[in-house]
Amino acid sequence: MAQEVGDKMAAKPMLVRELLGESLREERTAQGRTLREVSQLARVSLGYLSEIERGQKEASSELLGSICGALGVPQSSVFRALSDKLVMHEHITKFRVPPMPPRELWESEQPVAV
């Protein structure tokens, strides 16, 4: 439920577990993989993996490692996607954090004119 702040409504705070689940689901679906396939490879129940992807359950660091291993992606890439989503959420809510420039700019080895 949103709470009133002055004349504006503040958005429901975004939970990290929701962003993590969204990032994992995006990676899985981008690979064309099913919940069943990833759950078997990660040795986690299909229902529990589904709850993690929907942001209803928190994944332990061990379980996250297993899921990332099953997806064949480093944990850092999942956390990077999560971080990008969090920055965008903060930008459009009460914090008004300026959006990060596209990753291509800040990861580039070439200087970028400002």
Image (cartoon, helix red, strand yellow):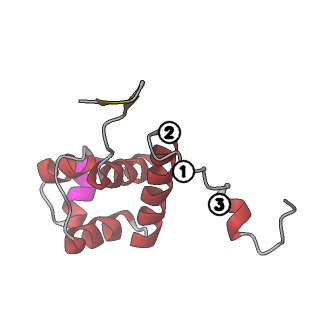
Per the image, is 25 magenta?
Answer: no
The residue pinned by badge 1 equals 97
Q: Would residue 39 appear left or right of 16 to someone viewing this image?
A: left
Q: Would residue 105 appear left or right of 75 to someone viewing this image?
A: right
Foreground mark, 3 or 1, reads: 1
Per the image, is 36 magenta?
Answer: yes
Position in image of residue 2 (x %, y %): 28, 30
Q: Residues within 10 Å of mark 3 (few under 14, many from 20)?
A: few
- Residue 39 image label: none
The residue pinned by badge 2 equals 92
Amino acid on which disc 2 is placed: Ile
Q: Residue at x 24, y 65 (%)?
A: 41
Foreground mark, 2 or 3, reads: 2
Task: In this rendered view, identify the residue nearer to me: 31 or 16.
Answer: 16
Task: In this rendered view, identify the residue nearer to me: 48 or 92.
Answer: 92
Q: Quadrant of residue 1?
A: top left
Q: Earlier in the sequence, mark 2 or mark 1?
A: 2
Q: Residue at x 20, y 53 (%)?
A: 49
The residue pinned by badge 3 equals 103
Main SS of the magenta part reads helix
Alpha-carbon span between mark 2 and mark 3: 19 Å
Q: Provide the residue span drawn in magenta.
A: 34-39
Q: Would residue 54 appear left or right of 74 to someone viewing this image?
A: left
Position in image of residue 104 (x %, y %): 70, 61
